[in-house]
Amino acid sequence: MLTFELLKTEGQARRGRLTLNHGVVETPVFMPVGTDGTVKGVLPRSLEEMGAAIILGNTFHLWLRPGLDVIRRFGGLHRFEGWQRPMLTDSGGFQVFSLGGADGKGRRLTEEGVHFASPVNGDKLFLTPETSMQIQTVLDSDIAMQLDECTPYETAGRVTSLDEARASMAMSLRWARRSQAEFARLENRNALFGIVQGGMFELLREESAARLAELDFPGYAVGGVSVGEPKEEMRRIMASTPRLLPAAKPRYLMGVGPPEDLVEGVGAGVDLFDCVMPTRNARNGHLFTRFGDLKIRNARHRADERPLDPTCGCHCCARFSRAYLHHLERCGEMLAPMLASIHNLHYYVNLMREVREALDEGRFAAYAQQFAAERARGIE
Amino acid sequence: MLTFELLKTEGQARRGRLTLNHGVVETPVFMPVGTDGTVKGVLPRSLEEMGAAIILGNTFHLWLRPGLDVIRRFGGLHRFEGWQRPMLTDSGGFQVFSLGGADGKGRRLTEEGVHFASPVNGDKLFLTPETSMQIQTVLDSDIAMQLDECTPYETAGRVTSLDEARASMAMSLRWARRSQAEFARLENRNALFGIVQGGMFELLREESAARLAELDFPGYAVGGVSVGEPKEEMRRIMASTPRLLPAAKPRYLMGVGPPEDLVEGVGAGVDLFDCVMPTRNARNGHLFTRFGDLKIRNARHRADERPLDPTCGCHCCARFSRAYLHHLERCGEMLAPMLASIHNLHYYVNLMREVREALDEGRFAAYAQQFAAERARGIE
C-alpha cells in the first residue's frame, strides 16, 4: 500500500505524508542509502535515533549477495537487516549499466533486458523488468522501482544525442509497462514507482512524464540526473521535471545530491531524495554542517575543542570535539567514519526536518534563503 | 586516589571493589583496550551500555598522536575521548620494546631509558620512567603503570636465560623506584601500579614481587606473560605469580587472554585483565560465545536465522542474525567489525560479571567448571 497526502504547498514546494506498509514518512525526506543491506558504518539504531524514516536497499547488490534464497528465508529485507521502518529499493538497473564502464562493454543491452557478468563470481546474469520485480518482491521493500535505462550524459566522451535519448526513454517506458504488469502478477502489496527519463531534453522529459502518468503509478521518480552532466544542465532538468508529474503522487529525485541541491529540489516540487554523499564523504573526512563543509584532516582542527557544529544535535556533536575527530581520522581509526557518518546523515535528515517545519509554517522561501546564506558563510 | 576493598575470597579467587577518581570498578573485571584513544570500532556509549567499567589507553600511541599539547588542552584523556568512567594507561614500554623487532635494532636500551625513532614521523624520542610518568600525568588516567622492561620469552630464536631475565627484572625494579619518585614529584593524584617481571622463572618472580611490595604501590601488575611463551609456561607463571602479591592490593594480569585464561586467572587471584583479543578477533570475524567460538565467514552461517548466541544480551544478538553478520563480513562492510566488536566485548565484560556473581554467592569453583564444559561443548 501507499497513500500520499499533500498537506501543504508553497510555490512548487510540497509538504506531504506518505503511508507505507512499514510506517509513515513525512515529506520532503532524505533517505540514507544502504547498498549492501547496511547504511555503511552506521548502526540501525543510530539511524532511528537521528530520525531516519526510510532507507534504501540496492536490488543489484542484494541479489548477488546474500542472494534471494537467504532473503526469502527472512521474509524480506526488513528482518534480514534488522530495520522495521520503510525501505525503498532501486531496480538494479543503474548498477548494471555502471558495470559496463564508459564504453559499455561489460554488459549487453537488448529489448528484453541486460546481460552481464556478476562482479562477485563471474556468473552470467540477465536482468529484465520481470526479474527486477521478482527480486524486489522477495526483498519486500515498501517502494520498488521500475527497471529503466538510466540514459547516460555522455558515452566515451560523446554527449548523448536527442535521438539516442529518445530511444532510451522509449525503452524505459516499455520497461515501465512490463515492470508494472509483472508487479501486479506477483501480487506485490507494496508500491511501484515509474521513472522519468529523457536525458537533458525537456521535450523528452515531458513526453516521458505524460506517458508514465497514463500508467497511473502510485509515485514517480526523476532519473537520469547526476549522471556526469554539467551543474547547469542538472539544475535545468531538476527545476523543470518534477512539476511535469501528477501533483497527487509522491516525487522522488534519484541520487541527488549536495545539501544545496536538496533545498533547490524541494523548491522544484520533489518529495523524496537519496544520495551516497553523506556517508561516502564521511568516509573521506568531509563533514557537512549548517555553516559550510569542513575537511576534518585539516591541521587547523588538531587542537579544536569545539564540536563540528555547536547547533547540531547529533550524537557526534553532543559528545566529541573536532580535535578528537581529527585525531581518529589521522590514525585511520574506524571510529572516524562511524562518527562522521552519524553526523553527516543527521545533518541531511535534520535539514529535511527543518524544511518540513518551514513548509508547515509557510516560510519555506525564507528558510531557503537563510539556509543558503548560512551555508555560504563558511564554518569558523 | 585508589581504594580497594576485598569483599570476598574463594580459594585464591577474589571479589573486590576498586574506587578510583572517575568511579567505582567491581572486580574481577575485564578492561577493553583503547589504543589510540578509541576502543576500535566501538562507540563509547556502546561500552557504557555493555557495562564496561574501565578501559585502557596506550601511553605510547597517544604521546605520538595527538600529542600531549592536545591532550593537555582537554585536561586529560577522559574529556578528549568522551569517556568519563575510569581509565588505565600502560607505560608505553611494551610498544617501544615491540618496535625493535625480534633483534631489537629499532631501539636502544640504556639504564636511563629507551631511545627510539617515532614510527609516525621518524622523530628521535627517548622514553624514561620519568617521561612515562609525565605523559601519564597529562593523560590523567586513574591507573598509571610504571615503566618496565617487558622481558621477552626469546630473542632472535634464543630463549631468555636466567641471568638475562634477572638483569632485566632488576632494571624494571630500579625503574619502578624512579617511576614512583617521579609520580610523587608530579603530585599525580591517581594511582601508580608496579609491575612484576622475572620471565619464566618463579624465583625471579618471587624476588620481583617481594621487592615491589616494599615499595608499597597501591596495586600491582603481572607483566611479561603472553609474550610468545608456550602455553604451559604461561599457565605456570599465571598460576604462581598473583599469590606472591600483597593480598590487600589489586592485581592486574597484563595482556591476557582468551576467555579460558581469564577464568583461570581469576582462580589464581587476578582482579584486572585487559586484552586486544575481543576486538582484534572481531575484526577477523572470530566470535566468542558461551558455547565456543565461531568464524562468521564460514559458509554454514550463510542462511542461519539465529543470533550468535541466544543466551547473550548484547545489542548484536538482540537484533541481528548469523546470516546477516556473515553477509556483512563477506561484503567487507564496516558494520561487520562494529557488531562483532560489540558482541565480543560484551562477552568478555559479561563473563566477568558472571564470575563476580559466582564469587558473591560462593560458587566460583562450580561456575568455572560449568564455564569450561559449556565452552568445550562447541556452538551448534
Image (cartoon, coloured by chain):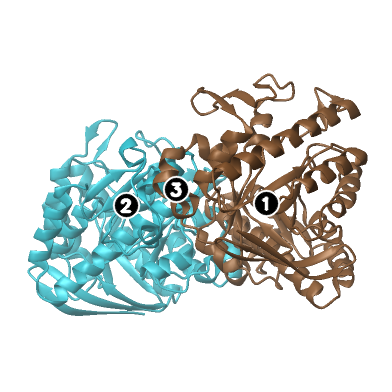
Chain colours: A cyan, B brown
The residue at 42%/73% (across/down) is A85
Q: Position of residue A349 (x, y in %)?
A: 30, 64
Q: Earlier in the sequence, mark 3 or mark 2?
A: 2
Q: Position of residue B200 (x, y in %)?
A: 88, 38
Question: Against A348, is B367 above or below?
Answer: below
Quadrant where the N terminus of chain A sits is bottom left
Q: Is residue A134 left or right of residue A232?
A: right
Q: CA distance from mark 3 to mark 2?
A: 16 Å
Q: Nearer the viewer, mark 3 or mark 1?
A: 3
Mark 3: which amino acid? Answer: Ala
| Residue for badge 3 | A336
* Number of marks in the rendered image: 3
Q: Are marks 1 and 2 in contact (CB under 8 Å)?
A: no
Q: Residue at x 72, y 54 (%)?
A: B273
* Residue B135 in sight: yes
Q: Which residue is mark 1?
A: B297
- The residue at the point 67 percent across, 69 percent down is B306
Q: Amino acid at mark 1?
A: Arg
Instruction: Please tell me in which quadrant of the rendered image residue B166 appears.
Output: top right
Tell me, for residue A306, which label it has, or none: 2
Relative to B345, is A123 above or below? above
- Residue B8 vs B174, above or below: the answer is below
Q: CA distance from mark 3 to mark 1?
A: 25 Å
Q: Tag 1, which chain?
A: B
